[in-house]
């Protein structure tokens, strides 16, 4: 049995703080763990139900501890990150709108058409 201590004794602890593996690049995009994988991709996969392990399998450059830390950071700071995600979504839509060939709509048919001899 542990000796009993006053509550104030328990408050004398050292905080352990790890750096969150996120870096903002020159364009203002958050990248995870020193890779080119964006925070958006990790969060989008997580919000679709993927586990950290599944995310690492999909993006093999990522490290499992980094993905767990990033997901935890996202969950803790979702309100603060909301504007960032909205901006990224607008930028994505603008980019797709300016390049209709990149649209996922009809992509399969366009790719199959390329395979057919002319």
Image (cartoon, rainbow, N blue to C red):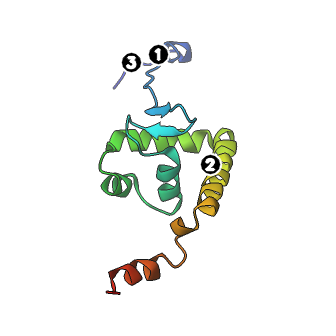
User: Which is in the foreground here, disc 3 or disc 1?
Assistant: 1
Q: Is residue 109 left or right of residue 118?
A: right
Q: Earlier in the sequence, mark 2 or mark 3?
A: 3
Q: Secondary structure at mark 1?
A: loop
Residue position for label 3: 3
Q: CA distance from mark 2 to mark 1?
A: 40 Å
Q: Position of residue 71 (x, y in %)?
A: 49, 45
What crowding class fits label 2: few (fewer than 14 Cα within 10 Å), some (14-19), or many (20 or more)? some
Q: Position of residue 15 (x, y in %)?
A: 47, 19
Q: Is residue 105 above or below residue 93?
A: below
State the CA–CA distance, disc 2 to disc 3: 54 Å
Tell me if residue 18 comes above or below residue 70 in the rendering.
Answer: above
Q: Earlier in the sequence, mark 2 or mark 1?
A: 1
For disc 2, the marked residue is 88
Q: Which mark is residue 13?
A: 1
Which label number is shown at residue 113? none
Task: Mark 2 vs mark 3: give the one in front.
Answer: 2
Q: Nearer the viewer, residue 80 or 116?
A: 116
Q: Is residue 107 above or below residue 88?
A: below
């Amino acid at each position: 049995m542990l000796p009993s201590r006053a509550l104030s004794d328990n408050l004398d602890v050292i905080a352990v703080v790890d750096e969150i593996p996120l870096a903002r690049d020159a364009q203002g995009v958050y990248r995870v763990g020193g890779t080119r994988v964006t925070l958006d991709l990790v969060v989008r996969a997580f919000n679709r139900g993927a586990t950290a392990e599944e995310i690492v399998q999909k993006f093999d450059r990522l490290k499992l501890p980094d993905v767990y830390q990033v997901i935890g950071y996202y969950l803790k700071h979702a309100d603060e990150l909301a504007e960032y995600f909205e901006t990224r979504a607008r930028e994505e839509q603008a980019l797709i709108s300016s390049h209709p060939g990149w649209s996922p709509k009809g992509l399969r048919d366009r790719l199959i058409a390329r395979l057919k001899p002319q």
